[in-house]
Every structure is written in C-alpha cells, then in structure tokens.
Amino acid sequence: MTAVDKSSEKKFPNEVKLLDAIYEDIIEAVHNEPDMNNIESMRLYIENSYRIFNRTIFRVVEIKNSLTKNEKLDSSTWNPPA
C-alpha cells in the first residue's frame, strides 16, 4: 500500500460551504409545506420555492466557476509519427 501524499490532496472549503447552503435551502423548502386549503399559503410557498431554485442555480454556477478557474485547458494535439 502506498501512502497518500497530503500535498496532492485538494481542499475545497468555499465549495463545501456553498453546497451546505444549497442543502439547507432545499431542506427548508421541503419542510415548509403549505396549507393546501389556504391559497395565500400556497402562493407564498411557490414564490419561496422559485427564490430558492434561482439562488441554487447561481450557487451551482459559482461552484462550477470556482472549480474550473484554475484548470488549464489542454490545447495541444497529439501528432503520431508517420
């Protein structure tokens, strides 16, 4: 067995924080079920759900951009010998 080189491990503290926030928002949305007999309660639930979905989209894009920020694209081509 080889020892894992600690310097090669990548830590993603900002991304983990954003993922935790997304998780909390989704849990909150699931647990805040509206009263199905109250139209105002249902309207508020739908508005809050859309707000959470939009915020989640922006957070996911931010995570993606953060993860790909330092990634260098390989633009080289492989040219085999003739």
Image (cartoon, rainbow, N blue to C red):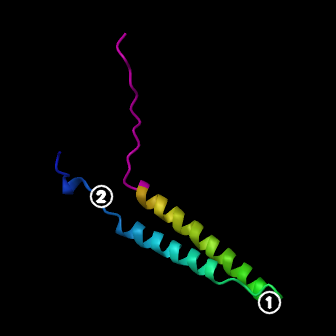
Q: Residues within 10 Å of mark 2 (few under 14, many from 20)?
A: few
Q: Quadrant of residue 12?
A: bottom left
Q: Secondary structure at mark 2?
A: loop
For image coordinates 42% across by 73% down, the residue present is 17
For image coordinates 37% across by 17% down, the residue present is 80
Q: Residue furthest front?
A: 1
Left or right relative to 21: residue 78:
left
Tags 2 and 1 touching, CB below 8 Å: no
Q: Is residue 24 within the magenta segment?
A: no
Q: Is residue 70 within the magenta segment?
A: yes
Residue 6 position within the rendered picture, expressed as x and y whole percent measured from the top left: 20, 57
Q: Secondary structure at mark 1?
A: helix
Left or right relative to 2: residue 17:
right
Considering only vertical position in the picture, is 51 above or below 66?
below
How many numbered markers are drawn?
2
Q: Which mark is residue 19?
A: none
For image coordinates 58% across by 81% down, the residue present is 28
Residue 45 position within the rendered picture, expressed as x and y whole percent measured from the top left: 71, 82
For image coordinates 47% across by 59% down, the residue present is 65
Considering only vertical position in the picture, is 66 above or below 51?
above
The residue pinned by badge 1 equals: 40
Instruction: Please tell me which residue lies in front, 73 or 22.
Output: 22
Circle nearer the viewer, 2 or 1: 1
The magenta stretch spans which residues? 68-82
Q: Residues within 10 Å of mark 1 (few under 14, many from 20)?
A: few
Name the amino acid type tagged 1: Glu
The residue pinned by badge 2 equals: 10
Name the amino acid type tagged 2: Lys
